[in-house]
Image (cartoon, grey):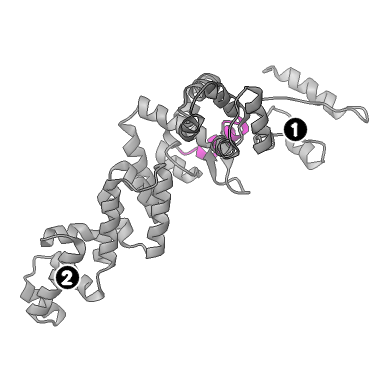
Amino acid sequence: MTERRCYAAINYLAERLPVGCQLALATRTDPPLPLASWRAHGRLLELRAAELALEHAEARAVLAAAQVHLTEDLVAKLVERTEGWPAALYLAALSLRDRPHPEHFVDRFAGTSRHVADFLSEDVLGRQPQEVNTFLLRTCVLDELTPSLCDELTGDTDAAIKLRQIERSNLFVVPVDEEQLIYRYHHLFAQYLRAELARQAPDLVPELHRRAWRWYRDHGLSGRAVAHAQASGDVDVAAELLGVQSAAHIEETEVMLAEHHDAGVLPDLYAEAVRRGRAARALSDAELRVLRLLASDLSLSEIGRELFLSTNTVRSHRRAIYRKLGVSSRVDAVKAAGTTALQS
């Protein structure tokens, strides 16, 4: 229904309902009706995505109705992956029929699974205007959506408006906080969007991650900056960011990266960045002072005079720096430590 006169008629009826009567509306998006007023006066009962999400027993019943019988652990895993989304559970049930090893399918079930991807493409993105689809694809690399960060990735200034519109349209956007300042995409939807972005604009993926790590770095969120720096291929930046983190923060970053990549271990490329970051942090204060001067063109004897140290002491510090950073030259030592370590 799109005709506004129809909504005016519904509003007229709702305001004049006799005692004991109820009006039920089923809609994909929020209709142009005074919902806020009805909500404030206790006249509105809402059943949204959170209320419609299936719990364990309900999901098991849906699967059983499709002649799919899983262990309790597999049902729980499928509910977690789908976040209880009924349509996804049903589509999973269709795919699970007659599979000899359902555990393999459940482990791999994602937004890119054929039935789910087809549904999202035809029934969700296919109904949206191009500007909304562009926004969804350019922000899908983010785990959390804030207006300022989304504006950074899209190059626009209306992310706050778009996020509210997308939420009202029930486009698989979930508020993370009560103030509705931070959102996230439904996990399956995010997986589907990321696959679509990689298919439609693969060259744009690293640039979006690059914009994200710069925003997170500038806002003091180094853990998230590290994850996006790795995803963009800027491993030196990732190592530099790790180099100024505490041991506890590095452990948190490792967990975040492992979850971000859906793997039990960090990628080999990033493991090297972690090693370099830890090594830079392991330098003593005296070694850091020597390292900062190694970045200049001063000789060892000149560095010694600058720091009131003998040349042999400077040489000993240099050997320790090379050993901890795993390098063999001044240039490599400076590069491995990163500019942040040199300036701190």
Quarter of the image holding residue 221?
A: bottom left
Can you see residue 188?
yes
Residue at point 60%, 45% (across, down): 180
Residue at point 32%, 38% (across, down): 206
Quick one: label 1 or label 2, which is nearer the N terminus?
Answer: 1
Would residue 159 be counted in the magenta stretch?
A: yes
Left of 158 or right of it: where is 323?
A: left
Q: Position of residue 134 (x, y in %)?
A: 44, 28
Question: How many other residues sit within 10 Å of disc 2, few (<14), some (14-19) or many (≥20)?
Answer: some
Residue at point 6%, 70% (across, down): 299
Magenta stretch mostly in which secondary structure?
Answer: helix
Q: Which residue is mark 2?
A: 320
Secondary structure at badge 2 equals helix
Residue at point 60%, 32% (across, down): 85
Q: Which residue is mark 1?
A: 34
Highlighted magenta segment, given as a residue range: 157-171
The mark lying in front, picked from 1 and 2, is 2
Q: Amino acid at mark 1?
A: Pro
